[in-house]
Amino acid sequence: MNDRNREERQSPKLDTRLIHFGSEVDPATGASSVPIYQASTFHHHDIFNPPTHDYSRSGNPTRQALEDYIAVLEGGVRGFAFASGMAAISSTFMLFSAGDHLIVTEDVYGGTYRLLTQILSRMNIETTFVDMTDLEAVKAALQPNTKAVYMETPSNPTLKITDIGAVAEWAREHDLISIVDNTFMTPYYQRPIEQGVDIVLHSATKFLGGHSDVLAGLAVARDDALADRLKYVQNGLGTVLGAQESWLLMRGMKTLGARMAHSEISARKLADWLARRQDIAAVYYPGLAEHPGREVQEKQSKGYGAVVSFDVGSGDRAKRVLSRVKLPLVAVSLGAVESILSYPAMMSHASMPPEVRLERGITDGLLRFSVGLEDIGDLLADLEQALEA
Ligand SMILES: *Cc1c(COP(=O)(O)O)cnc(C)c1O
């Protein structure tokens, strides 16, 4: 059964679950938002009958509401909130031990690449990076000590599409834990657990938070055994999200559907507009008819997302565009109410050796546009004046 059929059968629908997620009304007072429990510890009224939460690293009611919220949205058994996307990712990798081997997409987020190659490698956790769009390449990377497969789709910044269900099924056959970084799609468009994946990760700093004002990470487990292991790691490492940030993130998540839907319509228009121009060397967007991953994207996702990458032909021209645009933030990050224009060659992928960068299509002319909520006519006019200057 594909995601679309599941969605149709699911009740209530995701748009409704985004608002009515279980903790939207405070049971004690009827307050219309989850209270911020700014407390590190909890009084034991009865020493023989300890409170549900006893210390905020181990559990905090505000964070708990957020953790339940993301679990409902992703269709997993339990959620976990962390201090950043990297805290969620690094904590998840702490499920593994010295001597273990991981298969990871070669287009993985730069911070995850650095964690694997510079930090986990010192702990004798070994990684093979593969082109995840090629299932045969994934299979060929299997070793006797392989423990997990780690996907990110669409990939950053060239938006390559991995077949989540196919990789997860193969992983299951080999007793590997399958993991997806679902930051770009969010559960609004893509729910990997429904495709057989074991753990879903998010940089909630991006679309889930949605306002460029909170740093956070989330993880969701498919089953109780994995959830227990993640809980143990989260509490053991202490990489938790604070109560204020938990509240702020929930505040942003309530409008995820409205924001994603609006931004995606604009992103499609931007991609079409760029594809029609003669002066753009390449456009990467999974919603374009000629995108090689479009079919897989449509099988596993309800949409194409709000990130469009395009190559303006040269580094000089890219820098001119960056200095002349007036509406988007020129910055790292993505997924906010305001559009954000990034320059991967000098920002997110600056530490990648130039030859590896070029091999991945991350040329000096490549720009990544995260489409916000501005009027699309205004965004196109702004980009046009920047391209034509
Ligand atoms: C930003 C990002 C991360 C890291 O998240 P932080 O919140 O910055 O720690 C991980 N994966 C992807 C795909 C990202 O875009």
Image (cartoon, grey):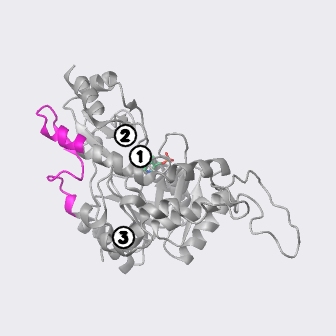
Upstream in sequence: badge 2 or badge 3: 3
Between the residue at mark 2 and the residue at mark 3, the CA separation in whole angstroms equals 36 Å
Circle on res. 110: 1
Image x and y of residue 313, in percent: 18, 31
In percent of width and height, residue 280 lies at 16, 34
Q: Is residue 294 left or right of residue 67?
A: left
Residue at the top extreme, as displayed: 389
In the picture of the structure, the residue carrying the numbered disc 2 is 349
Looking at the image, which residue is at 41% across and 48% down?
259
The residues colored magenta run 269-295
In the rendered image, the vertical position of residue 320 relative to residue 361, given as above or below: above
The residue tagged 3 is 7
Image x and y of residue 87, in percent: 56, 52
Amino acid carrying mark 1 in the image: Gly
Name the residue nearer the viewer: 123 or 290: 290
Q: In which quadrant will I find the N terminus?
A: bottom left
**In this rendering, is residue 248 above or below 313?**
below
- Determine the image quadrant of residue 299: bottom left
Residue under the point 36% across and 70% down: 7
State the separation of the CA atoms marked 1 and 2: 6 Å
Q: Give the mark toward the camera: 2 or 3.
A: 3
Instruction: Tell me the kind of residue under disc 2.
Output: His
Seen at 73% across and 58% down, the residue is: 56
Relative placement, left or right, of 175 versus 290 is right
CB under 8 Å between callouts 1 and 2? yes
